[in-house]
Image: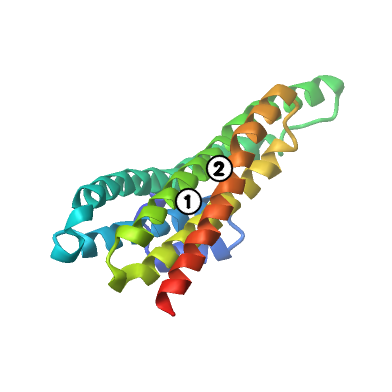
Amino acid sequence: MSNIPQWSCEKFVDETFSKAPVPGGGGVAALVGSIGVALAGMVCNLTTGKKKYAEYEEDIQRIIKEAETLKADLLALIDKDAENFLPLSQCYGLPANTEEEKAVKEKKMQEALLVAISAPIEIVRISYEAIKLHEELAKKGSKLAVSDVGCGVVCLKAAMQSGWLNVMINLKSIHDEAYVKSVEDELLPKIAEGEKLADAIYADVVSQLK
């Protein structure tokens, strides 16, 4: 499974709708996040070069470059998530009739879980960073596109939360307690801050639109 970002919108939705294991929640989270960042790019492109926002031009150029990188990273994670799930899905079919087979299966499961969880972790990290870009755009972007700032941040909040759910479902089966704690210690504060910030940005946009 590769080049999923090259699929049509219809194909992506239909494949997600089907019983195929991928794309699933992780791939959808990455796609939704990339769309959220794309809206940041749209707002930047509608703002740049406008005399009314000349004082923010340098910031807008910086944001558009950062958004381009984050968008590309999230799109790449659609394939990454699908590829990383494959080893884990294969583990479920391993025999476990003897103690030796059970031990081999468990070892392979633990290794595959660490691979499967890596893409959702990145989705959470990147979505959090992208939310912060929208905070700036709510103030510095073209007011004609402020609703797109709100739409973008809603998408990114959903991507971050969806990514975390895909982390959790793998994390609960990982036996390495130190690893589990390190992931939770890093991501939970980001999620709490990201949710609070996303809600504040959304409220700010709603206030501007009234």
Relative to residue 50, is residue 174 drawn left or right? Answer: right
Left-right relation of 175 to 119 = right
| Residue furthest out toward the front | 55
Q: Disc 1 designates what residue?
A: 30
Q: Which residue sits at x=36%, y=69%?
A: 146
* Amino acid type of the residue tagged 2 in the rendering: Pro
Sort mark 1 into few (<14), some (14-19) or many (20+) by Cα contacts within 10 Å: many
| Nearest the eye: 154 or 120 | 154
Of all residues, the one furthest to the top in this rendering is 100
Q: Secondary structure at mark 1?
A: helix
Q: Is residue 69 left or right of residue 90?
A: left
CA gap, disc 2 to disc 1? Answer: 8 Å
Q: Residue at x 25, y 45 (%)?
A: 62
**Circles 2 and 1: CB atoms closer than 8 Å:** no
Q: Residues within 10 Å of mark 2 (few under 14, many from 20)?
A: many
Can residue 22 be seen in the rendering of this structure? no
Quarter of the figure with the C terminus: bottom left
Quarter of the view holding residue 56: bottom left
Q: Determine which of the numbered discs, if any, sits on residue 120 in the image.
A: 2
Q: Residue at x 29, y 57 (%)?
A: 41
Q: Give the x, y percent position of residue 194.
A: 54, 49
Check disc 2 and report its element: helix, strand or loop. helix
Disc 2 or 1, which lies upstream in sequence? 1
Q: Nearer the viewer, residue 130 or 121?
A: 130
In the image, residue 4 sits, relative to residue 152, either above or below, namely: above
Q: Quadrant of residue 174?
A: top right
Percent position of residue 163, x then y = 57, 48
Q: Quadrant of residue 100?
A: top right
Circle on res. 3: none
Residue in the image at 74% along x and 27% along y: 105
Q: Where does the image place residue 118, in percent across and percent down from the top left? A: 55, 35
